[in-house]
Amino acid sequence: MTTARPASDSERSSIPVFDQRPAEHPSWIVPRSAYLHIPFCAHKCGYCDFASVAGQDDLADAYLDALRHEIRRSLDDLPSLDTIFVGGGTPTRLSALQLERFCDIVRDTFRLLPGYEWTIEANPGTLDRDKVAILARHGVTRVSLGAQSFDSDALAALERNHAPRDVFRSVELVREAGLKWSLDLIFGAPGSSTRTWNSDLDTVLGLAPYHLSCYGLVYEKGTELWKRLQAGLVEPVDEDLEASMYETTIDRLSAAGLDQYEISNYAKSGFECRHNLVYWRNDAYYGFGLGAARYVAGLRATNIRDLPGYIRRIERGEDVTGPSERLSPLERAGETATLMIRRTSIGIGRADFFIRTGFELDALFGPVLRKHESNGLISDDGHTIHLTRKGIMLADCVAADFTEPIQP
C-alpha cells in the first residue's frame, strides 16, 4: 500500500545522492508542508474541476472521521510542519461544530513549527463571525477568500452563489480577528470587458489587500462551463482582450505595491503564500483527503475522487491512492525547472537548481535557454534565469520547453 510518510532509513539508502537534501534543508524529501482537502460545496461551479461535491453534506461527519484515520495511518509520528493549506470544495461549508472538529484533527495530528503558516480557503457566502472565531482560536493564520469578481454578471456567468457584499463582510470579519487574508479573482469571464475588469481591480484595491491571486478563466475539459462552450452556449472573451486584462493586472497591482511573485500571484513584500512557494520549488509535501495530491520521498500520488468510495475504503482499512508516479532523476529535474520558472521574482538560480537536482541547468537546458533569451522571453545574468515581461505573457510556452531536459 502506498502511504504518505517520511522515507525510512532503508528507503533513503535507495534514493540517489542528489535527491538527499542536507540535514539543514530536509524538505527536499521530507515534507514540511501538508495539503488537506474538504470537498463539500453548496453547488458545483461551472468552471470547477476540483474534487468537490454538492448535496452530500450528510457525509461530512463520516468524511472527517475518514480524513483523521487517513492521516494517522499514513504517518509514523507527528510531523513538524511549516505550512498547512486547507482547500476544497469549500472548507467553510462545514458547520461551526464540524469546523471546530476539523481544526482539532489538525492540531492532534501535526506539530506546527514556530512561525508556521496555516491557510484555509473560504467562500464569502459561507463565512460568519462564529466560524472566523473558531479559525482564529485554533491558530489559523491566513484566510483565502474566493471572491472571483465583484461584478454580478460575472459571478452569474461563473455560477458563483455569493454576492459582492459577502466579500466585504468576510474581509471585515477576518480583519477583526487579526488574521491575514487573500482574495482570488478571475478575469476573462464570459461577457466581461476591460471596463468590468478595471472595476474589479478598483474595488479590490480599495480593500487594501496584502495578497491577491488573479487567474485567467480556463475552460477545463469535462466541466459544465466547457460543455456549454462546446455546445455554443457561451462565448469566451477574445484572446487579445484577455491578454490586455492580464497586463493591466500586472501594472495596476505593481503600482499599488503588490509585486507579481508568480504567474498569477501578487503580494506585498513578506506576504507571499509560503505554502504555494513549496509547490513552485518542487519540494515534498503531504496531501490528505478526497482527490488530494502528495509528493513524498520521490513518489507523486493522488487520492481517489469518489467520496463514498473514499470513506468506504478508509473504513475497511484500504488504500485510497489513485494515480501515482515515481519520477526519474532527469524527470524530476525537468519538473523542477518547469515549476521554478513560474516564480517571476525569483526565477531559476543555477546554484539552487544544482543543489536541488544534482544537475547543471545549462547541461540540461542549454538550447532552451539560448532560444528563449534570443527571442526575448527570458533574461539571464549568468546566475539566475527570469521570465521577461514578454515571457510572462507566454509563460506556458516557455515552461513547456523545460519538461524534456537533454540526457547528460
Image (cartoon, rainbow, N blue to C red):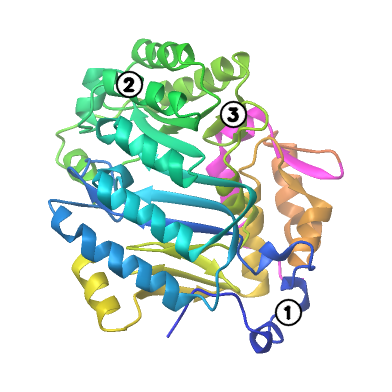
Q: Quick one: 22 or 252, which is closer to the camera?
A: 22
Position in image of residue 173 (x %, y %): 38, 25
Residue drawn at 61 percent across, 13 percent down: 255
Residue at the disc numbered 3:
267
Disc sitting over residue 161 in the figure: none
Q: Is residue 123 visible?
A: no
Q: Quick one: 67 or 290, which is closer to the camera?
A: 67
- Name which quarter of the figure residue 125 lies in: top left
| Mark 3 to mark 2 CA distance (whole Å) | 22 Å
Image quarter where the C terminus lies is bottom right
Position in image of residue 376 (x %, y %): 70, 33
Residues rendered magenta in the picture: 382-408
Disc 1 versus disc 2: nearer the observer: 2
Residue at the disc numbered 2:
169
Q: Amino acid at mark 3?
A: Ala
Relative side of 224 to 37, left or right = left
Most distant residue in the bottom direction: 10
| Mark 1 to mark 3 CA distance (whole Å) | 36 Å
Secondary structure beneath label 2: helix
Dot 1: few (<14), some (14–19), or many (≥20) neighbours within 10 Å? Answer: few
Disc sitting over residue 16 in the figure: 1
Asked if the stretch drawn in magenta spans residue 240, the answer is no
Position in image of residue 280 (x %, y %): 60, 50
Q: Amino acid at mark 1?
A: Pro
